[in-house]
Amino acid sequence: MKQLTDGVYFTGVLNPNLRVFDVIMRTEYGTSYNSYVVRGTRKTALIEAAHRSFLTLFRDELAQVPEGRTPDYLILNHTEPDHSGCVAELLKLYPDIEIYATQAAGVYLKNITNLPDLRVHIIKDGETLDLGGKTLRFLPAPFLHWPDSMFTYLEEDKILFSCDFLGAHYCEPGVLDEHIVYPDAYESALKYYFDCIFGPFLPWVRKGLEKLAPLEIDMACTSHGPVLTRGGRLENALEKYALWSREEPAGPKKIPVFYCSAYGNTAKLAEAVRRGILRAFPEAKCEACNIIERDMAELAALLNGSDAFAIGCMTLNRDAVPPIYTLLAHADAVNIAKRPAALFGSYGWSGEGFANTAARLNSLKCRVFDEQFKVTLVPSEEDIRAAEAFGERFAGSL
């Protein structure tokens, strides 16, 4: 427990040893499950809960709040299980607590707690809750990063409880940003967190920043990572979010060509397809990328930032090779729908890799080019010229 200001306490738990979060995110600096107690003269609110694995530690943190009162309200800005996993147990400890959340959160909570009759106060945009000298205002912020997300603003103290917004999987014992010992590591964690969590939702990030713009914020109490303060790292985080979410001005088309090639045959076709694309769009940003030789995060950025893309696949054991699927597993499925995609490559015995890769692209709702360009084993000079023409036809279909 740490007092942040009069009547406001940090009651989260630290998890410095976590190295993978939600299966796919690296957490080389650990994380924290942040929650806060706001104590007014009449009522007390608990803002956010914690991962169910940390119930005992979380309960111990709550017990340390001076003159600890039983919480009257549980404010859930978001119901992903790292925020809400211990709610069912908390309800046993505090059976009279009243939950405040968005409508979407109310639906999710019933399934998370397995309590179909769970009572949830559904907030309205701008609604307030008076605790006695401490007024909480609720601001829905959908898709930051679930449909249920909201901000909570403590008016008297100018504190924003920002949910996942502005957070980072970064764990140091000091809690406040002024105590960060490794600032470069924190900045890296901030960017990685933004890319993974908010990268698919950039228009909603911009809307979230617009919603916060009228507020005077002295402190941002995040759900993960350090608490950010005015004059500390708060302004930097807000500026970075504005920079990272900005709308890019229209420019040359981005049409990367990805491929895997065991013996160099699909690699030759990739270069030919690239030349064909550049015939149609000479100014396009179009490079041929060998998937196994490039950093996957870099490739994912090229894929998700593309206007269209082509994939050169090969077949092994009647399927596409794993790096193809690894790349497509990094696709931003929220925004890649209707993205034009083309398939080409060399194969030996059978060539099932093409159909299976096309199936994956279709499941992502990409707009797969009707034509596939296939060559058996080593492409001839005529095949190379045909691959160039294929690339030009694909580009011409955009």
Image (spheres, rainbow, N blue to C red):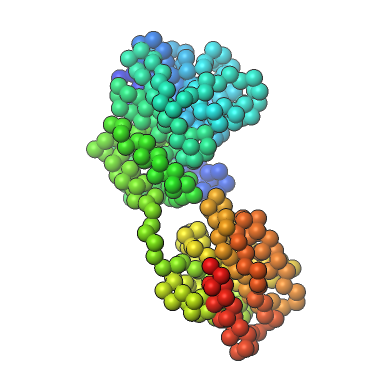
Identify the residue at the far left of this view.
231
Q: Nearer the viewer, residue 182 or 11?
A: 11
Q: Considering only vertical position in the picture, is 276 above or below 231?
A: below
Can you see residue 12?
no
Q: Residue 55 appears in which quarter of the rendering?
A: top right
Q: Considering only vertical position in the picture, is 294 above or below 117?
A: below
Q: Residue 347 appears in which quarter of the rendering?
A: bottom right
Q: Where does residue 140 sit, x and y in percent of width and height?
A: 45, 32
Identify the residue at the far front of this view.
397
Query: Which residue is at a point 67% across and 80% down the rendered structure image?
Result: 375
- 207 relative position to 321: left or right: left
Q: Residue 161 appears in which quarter of the rendering?
A: top left
- 316 relative position to 222: left or right: right
Q: Where does residue 54 sit, x and y in percent of width and height?
A: 53, 30
Q: Where does residue 389 sit, x and y in percent of width and height?
A: 57, 81
Q: Quadrant of the N terminus?
A: top left
Can you see residue 207?
yes
Query: Which residue is at a point 46% across and 50% down the rendered structure image?
Result: 199
Q: Where does residue 284 sit, x and y in percent of width and height?
A: 44, 71
- 369 relative position to 191: left or right: right
Q: Nearer the viewer, residue 246 or 1?
A: 246
- 155 relative position to 306: left or right: left
Query: Which residue is at a point 52% across and 15% down the rendered structure image?
Result: 97
Q: Nearer the viewer, residue 148 or 193?
A: 148
Query: Which residue is at a point 53% across and 79% down the rendered structure image?
Result: 276
